[in-house]
Amino acid sequence: MSKEPTIPSRIDFMLQGWKKMARGFDTVDHILRRQSVKRNLSSNRDGRVSLRTTVFIVMLLGPIYGIAMGCYAWVAGERTLVEQIPQMVYSGTKVPLLIFFTVLISLPSFFVINTLLGLRDDFRESLAAIISAQAGMIVILTSLFPLTLFAYVSTSHLEFNYPLAILINAGMFGLASVSAQVLLRGYYSPLIAKDTRHRWMVRSWIFVYAFVGIQASYVLRPFIGNPNTPTSFFRKDSFENAYVRVLQLASEVIQGFFS
Amino acid sequence: MSESAKPQVRSGTIGNWLYQLDRILRGEATRPTDIQQADIKIPVLGITLVVVVLAVIYGFCMGVFGIATGIESAQLQKALLQTFASMSKVPLLFFLTLIVTFPSLYVFNALVGSQLKILPVLKLLIASLAVNLSVLASMGPILAFFSLSTPNYSFIVLLNVVVFTAAGTLGLTFLIQTLNRLTVSQHGPSAPVAAIPVGPVEPNDAESEGSRLAVIKPAVEPGPLDRLQGIAMGSHVKKVFGCWIVVFGLVGAQMGWVLRPFIGSPNLPFQWFRPRSSNFFEAVGNTIYNLFS
C-alpha cells in the first residue's frame, strides 16, 4: 500500500530544503567574512575551504553574471529574447571557463615558486586561500549583476551604448577582482604572520593571475555580444593579444596627437 | 628535519629522480645542517636527465607559437621542424652556457677561498640549472597559452625574455646562497650554522599526515633561496659574485642569441641557425620598438 505523504512530512521536506539553502548562504557568508579559512588556519588544521565547494559556487554563480552580461542586445532592444539566448548561454558558460582556465594555467609556476621560497609545507593553505578567493570573486561578481542590468537598461538609448556596455562590464570585473584580492590578502594574513615570504608569493600570484586573466578574457570574447555582428562562441579574430592591442591603440593615439 | 624521517628512495628510477628534484626545490638538499661536508647529495646523472626533460618541455612550449602560425599559413612542416629545433635547442642553450661558464666559476670559487672540489661545484651548477629549468617549465603553460592566442611575434619574444630572466634570477639566487652555505661549511664557520633561527622544537600536530608524524622541525626552516642569518658574505666575495653573475647572464643571453631562432619568425623560412649578426641587447631594443609600430 503506497503511503501518501502527509502534510507534516511535506513541511519537513521543505524545511530541509530551506535549511540546505541557508547552509549555502552560510558558506557564501563565511567566504566573504573569511571565517572558515581563518578558523581553520588559526586552529592549525588543514585550512582548506573545500575545492568542491568552490567549483560548485563557480559553476552555479558564474553563469548568473554571464547570462546577465550576455542579454545586452535584448535589453538594449536590438534583438528578441529568442535571438539573444545563444549569446546568453555562451556567456554563461564562459565566465566559469575563464576562472578555471586562468587558475589552471597560473598554478604550476605558483607551486614551483612556493616550493623554492621554502613555503611548500604551507602550500595546502596557500592553495585554499587562492581557491576560496575565486569563490569570493564569483560571489562579488554575482552581487553586481543587477547593477549591470540596470546600467544596460539606463544606457540603451545612447548612441555609443555598446562600447559603454563593454566599459561597464570591464568595471564590474575590475571591481570584483580588486575586492577578491582584498579577500585573498585577508586569507593570506595568517600565513604572512607565520612567514613574511608569503607576502611576496601573494603579490606574484596576483601579478601572474591578472596577466593571464586579462589575456584569457580577451581570447574568450565576446562576452556581451555586439548587436551588429552575428552571435558566435569565439570571435573570428579572437586569437589576438590584449596587451599588444592596447599598446597599438596607445601608439595610434599618440601618433594622432602629434600629426 | 632528520633525513631518516623521509623516504629516501621512491619506487622506480624516474620517481626517485623527481623526488631528488623536489628535494632541491624544497631546499632539503642544500639545508645548512646537511651541507657540512661541503657537498650536495644529489644524483648528478639523474638530475641532469630531469633538467633535459624540463628543457625539452619548455622548448615545446616555445614551439607552440610556430605551430599556431604554421597552421594558419598552412606551413605545418616548417612549424614542426621549428618545434623540434626549439625542443633540442633549449637543453643545448643551458648546457653550452654551463660549459662556457663552469671553468670561471670554479676558479672564482677557489679565489673566494672555498676549498670546494670540482665535483661539488658541478653538482651545485646542475642543481641551480634544475631550479632554473623547473621555474621555466612551470611557466610553460602560460607561454603556450599566450603563443596560441598572440599573432604578434615581438610580444612572444619579449615574453620569453621576461620568463627566462625571472627563471634565471631565481636559479642564480639559489646558486649564490648555496655556494655561500658550502663555503661557510668548508671554512668551519666562525658564526656557526646554528645561528639560523631555530625556534622552539615542537612535535607536529598529531592529526597531520603519516610521514610528518613525530617529525621534529625548527619553527622557520630556511628556504633554498634564503640568506642565512648571522652569516654575512664578505665584501670581496660579494664583488666576485657580482662580476660572475654579470658574466653568466651575458653568456646566457648571448648564447641564446647565437642559437636562435627559438621561436621562429613567421615571415622567415625555417633555419637551424641564423647568420651571426648584431647581439642580444640590440635585438631586444629592436623588438620593443617593433611592438609599438
Image (cartoon, rainbow, N blue to C red):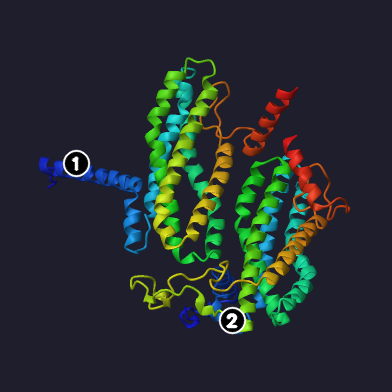
Instruction: Give the camera-side residue of B33 and B61.
Output: B33
Q: Nearer the viewer, mark 1 or mark 2?
A: 2
Q: Residue at x 47, y 29 (%)?
A: A70
Q: Which residue is labeled 2 in the image?
A: B189
Residue B38: x, y in percent?
63, 82
Q: Residue at x 58, y 66 (%)?
A: B225
What is the C-alpha distance between the residues marked 1 and 2? Answer: 72 Å
Residue B42 visible to an observer of this rendering: no
Label 2 crowd (10 A; few <14 / some 14-19 / many >=20): few
Which amino acid, mark 2?
Pro
Residue A210: x, y in percent?
54, 44
Residue A28 visible to an observer of this rendering: yes
Label 1 crowd (10 A; few <14 / some 14-19 / many >=20): few
Position of residue A112 relative to residue A34, above or below, is below
Position of residue A168 relative to residue B67, above or below, is above
> Contact, CB < 8 Å: mark 1 with mark 2?
no
Q: Is residue A124 left or right of residue B36?
A: left
Q: Residue at x 67, y 48 (%)?
A: B159
Q: Residue at x 84, y 46 (%)?
A: B269
Which amino acid, mark 1?
Met
Q: Which residue is labeled 1 in the image?
A: A14
Question: In which quadrant is the C terminus of chain B drawn?
Answer: top right
Q: Is residue B82 left or right of residue A137?
A: right
Residue A55: x, y in percent?
41, 49
Q: Is residue B171 left or right of residue A115?
A: right
Instruction: Give the camera-side residue of B84 and A213.
Output: A213
In the image as oriented, which residue stretches furthest toward the front?
B235
Q: Secondary structure at mark 1?
A: helix
